[in-house]
Image (cartoon, rainbow, N blue to C red):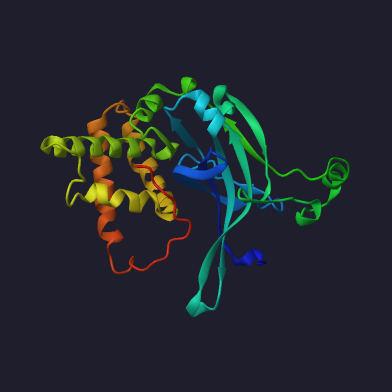
Amino acid sequence: SSFKDEDIVKRAIRFSLEETTDDLKNIVHNIIQIPAERHPNGEDIWSIDTKETQLRQVIFRTAQDDKDLNKKYRILLELVVYVQSGSNDKQKVTEMCCGWSEIKMDAFSRKQSIDLTIHGGSPTSELEISAKDLRTERQGFKAFSKAFRGVKSIIEVDIVPHRVLAEDVQCHMELLPQTCFVHKSLLSFISAFQNYKGKKLLNESGGGGFRKPAGDVIISCFPMIYDNPDIVEVLTEAWVEDVQPLINQNKQFDLPFITEKMKQFVSRLYPVLYSEEFKGIEYTGTTKTVA
């Protein structure tokens, strides 16, 4: 299907983990995405906001055996656009994958910057990207360069292995699920939730088996919050501006303090999530949580 640039209401890069078993490919664990914008100085160029309040840094955590990981898994990056169509009273937003790339597991063995080739279509239906499909401004030296080198479609990625991350980052990563993606700006928020959930489940295990605590606002609301990219973007900005400066004041390892702040944030969102204004809204780009 075709659409105009003005019909695009949002762009994002989505991260997921693909598992291959017996010639079958499945997306496993959770999915997250980071917002992107069309670059103002170049056509067909997407840019990511580099401010600390944004979601540009993604943490991938796994405790699985490296040999199995390299053999069975790859990380997929999908370039997703949300296209609005229909009349004013019956508008519909459709999600489309307009390109994708991959990161092999062995790329995480060292710190490096890599250029990932963008493939056309989607991971399940690949298409070739030809030069005529790219709307590039051919002016000045850029036109001269493209005439000889062609147009390259890439995603620039910086990889930092676990062993060189800050001590507090490594500490909070230990509280995450065995395999998952997390936005680095919300790492302390997610680890605090995992700590809270673990304590609750342990308290409920006294009867001989684990069960979800009845009526727990924090646990019931968390998937609704973290699976909605629009909420995550607002939450990140508030968490980084309001809470992270307090954490940085020698409270990086103070889990009770961080957990209390997490509970306050979720409790403030609870009445919004269940309000009449929020009901019936069809979320665009809903992801899948692993927590």
Is residue 266 positioned above or below 243 on the image?
below
Q: Position of residue 236 (x, y in %)?
A: 40, 45
Q: Where is residue 77 in the image (x, y as percent from the top left)?
A: 57, 43
Determine the residue positioned at 74% across, 50% down: 128
Q: Can residue 83 be seen in this view?
A: yes
> As drawn, is 206 to the left or to the right of 79?
left
Q: Tell which of 251 and 283 is nearer to you.
A: 283
Q: Tell which of 123 and 114 is nearer to you.
A: 123
User: Dividing the picture into quarters, in which one does residue 2 lie?
Assistant: bottom right
Q: In which quarter of the image is the N terminus?
A: bottom right
Determine the residue positioned at 35% across, 29% down: 172
Give the number of marks.
Answer: 0
> As drawn, is 255 to the left or to the right of 112?
left
Determine the residue positioned at 84% across, 40% down: 149
Q: In which quarter of the image is the C terminus?
A: top left
Furthest-left residue in this view:
207
Q: Can residue 54 be seen in this view?
A: no
Determine the residue positioned at 31% across, 48% down: 222
Furthest-top residue in this view:
163
Q: Where is residue 93 in the image (x, y as percent from the top left)?
A: 52, 66
> As drawn, is 196 to the left or to the right of 113?
left
Q: Tell which of 160 and 288 is nearer to you.
A: 288
Is residue 26 positioned above or below 65 on the image?
below
Q: Where is residue 103 in the image (x, y as percent from the top left)?
A: 59, 35
